[in-house]
Amino acid sequence: MFKKILLAYDGSLEYRAALRQGAELAQFCGADVHLLAIITSSSAMPIAGGVNPADLVTEEQREIHAFLQDGVERLRKRGINAEGRLGFRDPVDEIAATAREIGADLIVVGHRRRLTIERWWRKSTSKNLLAVAPCSVLVTSLQPEDED
């Protein structure tokens, strides 16, 4: 069935639920998991005077690396062979390219419910990923026990 699972992870509640569900599936299948966290650059955002954009990017990278390591540790505690990596491109492009590179059989992503204006303004990673993914995609959603 699935031997390599790529799990996109950003530390949010939705993606922690995806981590849990992906871990359960990996345990069931005996699959290796590659955890991918993507750094979307804050340097393109308008910044108030006196703030060094390089400091913000460095802090963002530190935070993302920390929750990536936490996710890898959670998987390993479950007995799953897990690796973590950082990506720096558009999330859809990064997830698809990484899946191809590692030969993933399955991509797992979390789903964020958005307000109508947010759906219009921001593209859906999971929806756009379906068009370019080189393998199956599992889009998870929050379960009541995840919201505690």
Image (cartoon, helix red, strand yellow):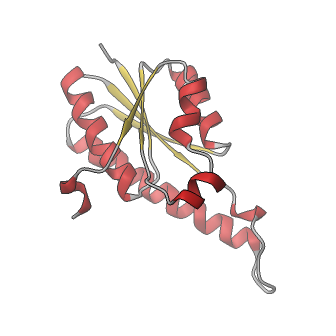
Q: Is residue 41 left or right of residue 39?
A: right
Above-or-below relation of 101 to 129: above
Residue 70 vertical placement versus 89 (above, below): below
Residue 31 rendering spot, x and y as whole percentages = 30, 23
Residue at 69 percent across and 72 percent down: it is 55
User: Quadrant of the rendered structure where residue 20 is?
Assistant: top left
Residue nearest the viewer, comparing 23 with 72: 23
Quadrant, the N terminus: top left
Number of numbered discs on residues: 0
Q: Is residue 88 left or right of residue 86?
A: right
Q: Nearer the viewer, residue 51 or 143?
A: 143
Residue 147: quadrant of the picture: bottom left
Q: Residue furthest right?
A: 49
Q: Residue at x 74, y 68 (%)?
A: 54
Residue reaching furthest to the bottom:
50
- Tell me which residue sits at (65%, 46%) in the image: 88
**Residue 60 location, x and y as percent?**
59, 64
In the shown orientation, is residue 41 left or right of residue 145?
Answer: right
Which residue appears at 34% of the width and 18% of the height?
3
Question: In this rendering, is residue 87 above or below 11?
Answer: above
Residue lying farthest to the top in this orientation: 1
Of the 4 image quadrants, the one containing the C terminus is bottom left
Residue 96 x, y percent position in the rendering: 58, 28
42 sits left or right of 82 in the view: right
Name the one closer to the observer, 142 or 80.
142
Q: Residue furthest front?
A: 116
Q: Position of residue 21 (x, y in %)?
A: 27, 39
